[in-house]
Image (tube, rainbow, N blue to C red):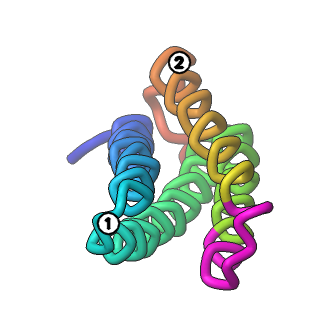
Amino acid sequence: MLTMAAQLRAVVSAHVVAIVGQPVFAGVYLTGDFDGLRWHAIGADVVTSIGYLQVIVAIVVWIRLRQIWPFLATAAVVAAETVQYFAGLDGALWLHIPLGVMTVVALVVLFIAVWSRPLPRREVRHG
């Protein structure tokens, strides 16, 4: 069984891989390949789903390892992703594009923090 730190690192890593594809799919669409928009929409669903999974893992890390920072950082990234997701659906590109750039950067910074900052190996025992 993976430690909580390993689980958090795994989900953040999957999240980064998924989100990095989003500008690529948008670029494919902007070059005239309309299938790129479909892939961008599918990617948005994948990124958002992984983000919500990351929230759950971060809550467990907070409770079991007594580390709140992964939850706070994840909550901020996922809130931005959610706003960005709905801005894209609405066609509000003035918000969707810059917030998308900021979200990718924020998630990469979180990825670096999760991989470089040590998390306790032992889980706090209750009782």
Residue 60 circle label: none
Q: Quadrant of the C terminus?
A: bottom right
Seen as rendered, the residue at the extreme left is 1
Q: Residue at point 63% right, 74% down?
A: 88
Residue occupied by mark 2: 118
In the image, the segment drawn in magenta is 85-96
Q: Front-most of 77 and 120? A: 77
Judged from the image, the secondary structure of the residue bearing numbered disc 1 is helix
Vertical order, 58 against 51 (above or below): above
Query: In this image, 39 relative to 118: left or right?
Result: left
Judged from the image, the secondary structure of the residue bearing numbered disc 2 is loop
Residue occupied by mark 1: 36
User: Where is residue 43 drawn, in percent x and y?
Assistant: 37, 66
Query: In this image, 18 relative to 75: left or right?
Result: left
Q: Front-most of 65 and 88? A: 88
**Magenta-span inclusion, residue 97:** no
Three-letter code for the amino acid on which mark 2 is drawn: Pro
Our reading of the magenta stretch's main secondary structure is helix
- Residue 66: tell me if it is visible: no
Vertical order, 56 against 106 (above or below): below
User: Where is residue 39 drawn, in percent x and y?
Assistant: 31, 69
In the rendered picture of this protein, how many numbered marks are placed on residues?
A: 2
Where, by quadrant of the figure, is residue 41 drawn?
bottom left
Q: Earlier in the sequence, mark 2 or mark 1?
A: 1
Q: Residue at point 57% right, 42% down?
A: 104
Q: Front-most of 10 and 60? A: 10
Within 10 angstroms of label 2, few (less than 14), some, or many (20 or more) residues?
few
Three-letter code for the amino acid on which mark 1 is drawn: Gly
